[in-house]
Amino acid sequence: MDSCLPIEMANNLRFRYMDQKKKKMVKFLKTNKAVIVLQGRYAGRKAVIVRTFDDGTRERPYAHCLVAGIKKYPSKVIKKDSAKKTAKKSRVKAFVKVVNYQHLMPTRYTLDVDLKDAVSPDVLQSKDKKVTALKETKKRFEERFKSGKNRWFFTKLRF
Protein backbone atom coordinates (compact mmCIF):
# COMPACT_ATOMS: atom_id res chain seq x y z
CA MET A 1 0.00 0.00 0.00
CA ASP A 2 2.87 2.36 0.73
CA SER A 3 4.42 1.63 -2.67
CA CYS A 4 1.21 2.77 -4.38
CA LEU A 5 1.27 6.20 -2.79
CA PRO A 6 4.26 7.64 -4.68
CA ILE A 7 2.77 6.57 -8.05
CA GLU A 8 -0.51 8.35 -7.29
CA MET A 9 1.41 11.43 -6.21
CA ALA A 10 3.45 11.32 -9.41
CA ASN A 11 0.27 11.08 -11.50
CA ASN A 12 -1.29 14.02 -9.66
CA LEU A 13 1.83 16.11 -10.17
CA ARG A 14 1.92 15.24 -13.85
CA PHE A 15 -1.71 16.29 -14.39
CA ARG A 16 -1.18 19.48 -12.44
CA TYR A 17 1.83 20.25 -14.63
CA MET A 18 -0.22 19.62 -17.78
CA ASP A 19 -2.94 21.99 -16.59
CA GLN A 20 -0.35 24.71 -16.10
CA LYS A 21 1.04 24.17 -19.60
CA LYS A 22 -2.36 24.41 -21.32
CA LYS A 23 -2.51 27.98 -22.53
CA LYS A 24 -4.22 29.71 -25.40
CA MET A 25 -2.33 30.23 -28.62
CA VAL A 26 -0.74 33.61 -29.07
CA LYS A 27 -2.54 35.98 -31.42
CA PHE A 28 0.10 37.28 -33.80
CA LEU A 29 -2.18 38.53 -36.58
CA LYS A 30 -2.90 41.92 -35.06
CA THR A 31 -3.88 45.33 -36.36
CA ASN A 32 -1.18 47.14 -38.41
CA LYS A 33 0.67 43.88 -39.16
CA ALA A 34 2.00 43.73 -42.72
CA VAL A 35 0.92 40.57 -44.52
CA ILE A 36 1.14 39.07 -48.00
CA VAL A 37 -2.04 37.83 -49.66
CA LEU A 38 -1.53 34.29 -50.95
CA GLN A 39 -4.76 33.48 -52.81
CA GLY A 40 -7.13 35.19 -55.20
CA ARG A 41 -6.99 38.30 -57.32
CA TYR A 42 -4.47 40.06 -55.09
CA ALA A 43 -2.14 37.09 -54.57
CA GLY A 44 1.41 38.29 -53.98
CA ARG A 45 0.29 41.76 -52.92
CA LYS A 46 1.26 43.33 -49.63
CA ALA A 47 -1.45 44.44 -47.25
CA VAL A 48 -2.01 45.73 -43.72
CA ILE A 49 -4.46 44.21 -41.26
CA VAL A 50 -7.09 46.79 -40.31
CA ARG A 51 -9.32 44.62 -38.12
CA THR A 52 -9.33 40.96 -37.08
CA PHE A 53 -12.20 38.55 -36.47
CA ASP A 54 -10.60 35.58 -34.67
CA ASP A 55 -13.88 33.80 -33.91
CA GLY A 56 -15.56 34.59 -37.20
CA THR A 57 -18.99 36.12 -37.78
CA ARG A 58 -22.40 34.76 -38.74
CA GLU A 59 -21.76 35.36 -42.46
CA ARG A 60 -18.15 34.12 -42.30
CA PRO A 61 -17.86 31.40 -39.63
CA TYR A 62 -14.06 31.22 -39.87
CA ALA A 63 -11.17 33.36 -38.67
CA HIS A 64 -10.70 36.28 -41.06
CA CYS A 65 -9.60 39.88 -41.16
CA LEU A 66 -10.19 43.11 -43.01
CA VAL A 67 -7.09 44.17 -44.93
CA ALA A 68 -6.10 47.22 -46.94
CA GLY A 69 -3.33 46.68 -49.44
CA ILE A 70 -1.53 47.89 -52.53
CA LYS A 71 -3.06 46.97 -55.87
CA LYS A 72 -0.48 48.91 -57.93
CA TYR A 73 2.94 49.72 -56.51
CA PRO A 74 4.72 53.04 -57.11
CA SER A 75 7.34 53.04 -59.87
CA LYS A 76 11.03 53.75 -59.42
CA VAL A 77 11.81 57.47 -59.34
CA ILE A 78 15.10 58.72 -60.77
CA LYS A 79 16.83 62.07 -60.35
CA LYS A 80 16.33 63.35 -63.90
CA ASP A 81 12.52 62.89 -63.81
CA SER A 82 10.45 66.06 -63.87
CA ALA A 83 8.22 66.95 -60.92
CA LYS A 84 5.15 65.93 -62.92
CA LYS A 85 6.65 62.55 -63.81
CA THR A 86 7.81 61.99 -60.22
CA ALA A 87 4.28 62.68 -58.96
CA LYS A 88 2.87 60.21 -61.48
CA LYS A 89 5.40 57.52 -60.56
CA SER A 90 4.69 58.00 -56.85
CA ARG A 91 1.02 57.05 -57.20
CA VAL A 92 -0.36 54.06 -55.36
CA LYS A 93 -3.55 52.09 -56.04
CA ALA A 94 -5.17 50.48 -53.02
CA PHE A 95 -7.60 47.65 -52.32
CA VAL A 96 -9.78 46.76 -49.34
CA LYS A 97 -10.81 43.17 -48.78
CA VAL A 98 -11.93 40.62 -46.19
CA VAL A 99 -9.51 37.67 -46.24
CA ASN A 100 -9.41 34.28 -44.53
CA TYR A 101 -6.41 33.85 -42.20
CA GLN A 102 -5.39 30.79 -44.24
CA HIS A 103 -4.79 33.00 -47.27
CA LEU A 104 -2.39 35.39 -45.53
CA MET A 105 1.31 35.13 -44.84
CA PRO A 106 2.38 37.34 -41.92
CA THR A 107 5.65 39.26 -42.12
CA ARG A 108 7.87 40.64 -39.40
CA TYR A 109 6.91 44.19 -40.33
CA THR A 110 4.26 46.48 -38.87
CA LEU A 111 2.92 49.67 -40.42
CA ASP A 112 1.91 52.66 -38.33
CA VAL A 113 -0.87 53.70 -40.69
CA ASP A 114 -4.14 54.46 -38.94
CA LEU A 115 -6.83 53.10 -41.24
CA LYS A 116 -9.44 52.14 -38.63
CA ASP A 117 -11.50 55.30 -39.13
CA ALA A 118 -11.25 55.12 -42.94
CA VAL A 119 -11.91 51.40 -43.44
CA SER A 120 -14.52 49.36 -41.58
CA PRO A 121 -16.39 46.11 -42.33
CA ASP A 122 -19.62 47.93 -43.26
CA VAL A 123 -17.72 49.90 -45.94
CA LEU A 124 -17.79 46.84 -48.19
CA GLN A 125 -21.62 46.75 -48.20
CA SER A 126 -22.15 49.66 -50.61
CA LYS A 127 -20.20 50.79 -53.65
CA ASP A 128 -20.01 54.52 -52.82
CA LYS A 129 -18.74 53.87 -49.27
CA LYS A 130 -16.09 51.54 -50.66
CA VAL A 131 -14.95 54.15 -53.20
CA THR A 132 -14.51 56.80 -50.48
CA ALA A 133 -12.65 54.27 -48.29
CA LEU A 134 -10.34 53.38 -51.17
CA LYS A 135 -9.58 57.07 -51.83
CA GLU A 136 -8.76 57.65 -48.17
CA THR A 137 -6.59 54.52 -48.04
CA LYS A 138 -4.78 55.58 -51.22
CA LYS A 139 -4.13 59.03 -49.74
CA ARG A 140 -2.69 57.61 -46.52
CA PHE A 141 -0.51 55.08 -48.34
CA GLU A 142 0.87 57.81 -50.63
CA GLU A 143 1.66 60.03 -47.62
CA ARG A 144 3.50 57.12 -46.04
CA PHE A 145 5.42 56.43 -49.26
CA LYS A 146 6.44 60.07 -49.70
CA SER A 147 7.66 60.28 -46.11
CA GLY A 148 10.14 57.50 -46.93
CA LYS A 149 9.07 55.22 -44.09
CA ASN A 150 8.32 51.51 -44.51
CA ARG A 151 10.16 51.33 -47.82
CA TRP A 152 9.86 47.53 -47.93
CA PHE A 153 6.07 47.72 -47.98
CA PHE A 154 6.01 49.82 -51.14
CA THR A 155 8.32 47.61 -53.21
CA LYS A 156 6.89 44.97 -55.51
CA LEU A 157 7.35 41.42 -54.30
CA ARG A 158 9.59 39.55 -56.73
CA PHE A 159 8.89 35.83 -57.03
Image (cartoon, rainbow, N blue to C red):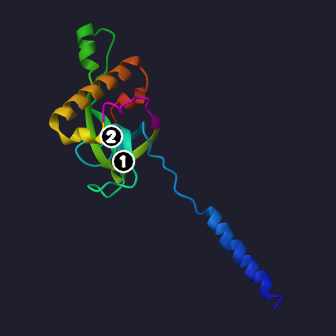
Residue at the extreme left of the image, as rendered: 127
- 74 above or below 57? above
Nearer to the camera, 56 or 98? 56
| Residue 157 percent location from the top left of the image | 34, 36
Residue 111 magenta: yes
**In which quadrant will I find the C terminus?**
top left
Residue where numbered disc 2 is placed: 67
**In which quadrant will I find the N terminus?**
bottom right
Q: Tell me the residue at 42%/39% (across/down).
A: 31
Is residue 94 visible in this depiction of the protein? yes
- Circles 1 and 2: CB atoms closer than 8 Å: yes
Residue where numbered disc 1 is placed: 104
Q: Tell me the residue at 74%/82% (across/down).
A: 8
User: Is 5 positioned to the left or the right of 127 in the image?
Assistant: right
Q: Tell me the residue at 75%/82% (across/down).
A: 7
Element class at badge 1: strand
Identified by mark 1, the residue type is Leu
Residue 128 magenta: no
| Residue 119 percent location from the top left of the image | 30, 34
Q: Tell me the residue at 41%/26% (across/down).
A: 151
| Residue 77 percent location from the top left of the image | 31, 17
Give the Cα separation between the discs numbered 1 and 2.
10 Å
Tell me which numbered mark, 1 or 2, is placed earlier along the sequence: 2
Q: Would you call the spot at circle 2 few (<14 residues within 10 Å), some (14-19), or many (20 or more)?
A: many
- Quarter location, residue 140: top left
Element class at badge 2: strand
Is residue 82 visible in this depiction of the protein? no
- Magenta span dominant secondary structure: loop
User: Is 80 positioned to the left or the right of 125 in the image?
Assistant: right
- 98 above or below 20? above
